[in-house]
Amino acid sequence: MKTAEEIVSGFLFKRIGTEEAYNLGYDCGINGPNLTNCNFKIFSTPENTKAWERGKKDGENSKH
């Protein structure tokens, strides 16, 4: 069983790449926001923020 420190450390310091940021944004566009696809760590860089926004837009557009 993981300690609280291991859980928090993994949550806070896991790096998110632009591809994952896009996929999380897409998920948000399809399924709505949740704790995973709108987590603050996604927006740690401008590139990730742009990728997430692009993914969210594409997800919303795919619903039509």
Image (cartoon, rainbow, N blue to C red):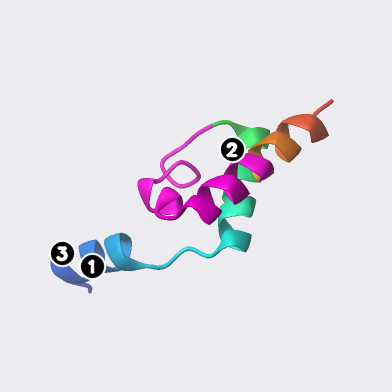
> Furthest-front residue in view?
46
Q: Nearer the viewer, residue 47 or 26?
A: 47
The tag earlier along the polypeptide, 1 or 2, is 1
SS type, badge 2: helix
Q: Mark 1 highlights which residue? A: 9
Q: Mark 3 highlights which residue? A: 4
Position of residue 15 in the picture relative to residue 9 (left or right): right
Q: Mark 2 highlights which residue? A: 28
- Please provide percent x and percent y for residue 27: 63, 43
Q: Name which residue lies at 51% across and 33% down.
A: 33
Residue 14, above or below 22 = below
> Furthest-right residue in view?
64
Q: Name which residue lies at 21% across and 71% down.
A: 6
SS type, badge 1: helix
Quadrant where the C terminus is found in the figure = top right
- Read off the magenta span: 33-54
Q: Is residue 37 magenta?
A: yes
The tag earlier along the polypeptide, 1 or 3, is 3
Q: Quadrant of residue 47?
A: bottom right
Quadrant where the N terminus is found in the figure = bottom left
Residues under numbered marks 1 and 3 in contact, where contact means CB atoms less than 8 Å apart: no
Mark 1 Cα shell of 10 Å, populated few (<14), some (14-19), many (≥20)? few
Mark 2 Cα shell of 10 Å, populated few (<14), some (14-19), many (≥20)? many
Q: Name which residue lies at 75% across and 39% down.
A: 58
Residues under numbered marks 3 and 2 in contact, where contact means CB atoms less than 8 Å apart: no
- Inter-mark Cα distance, 1 to 3: 8 Å
Position of residue 18 in the picture relative to residue 5 (left or right): right
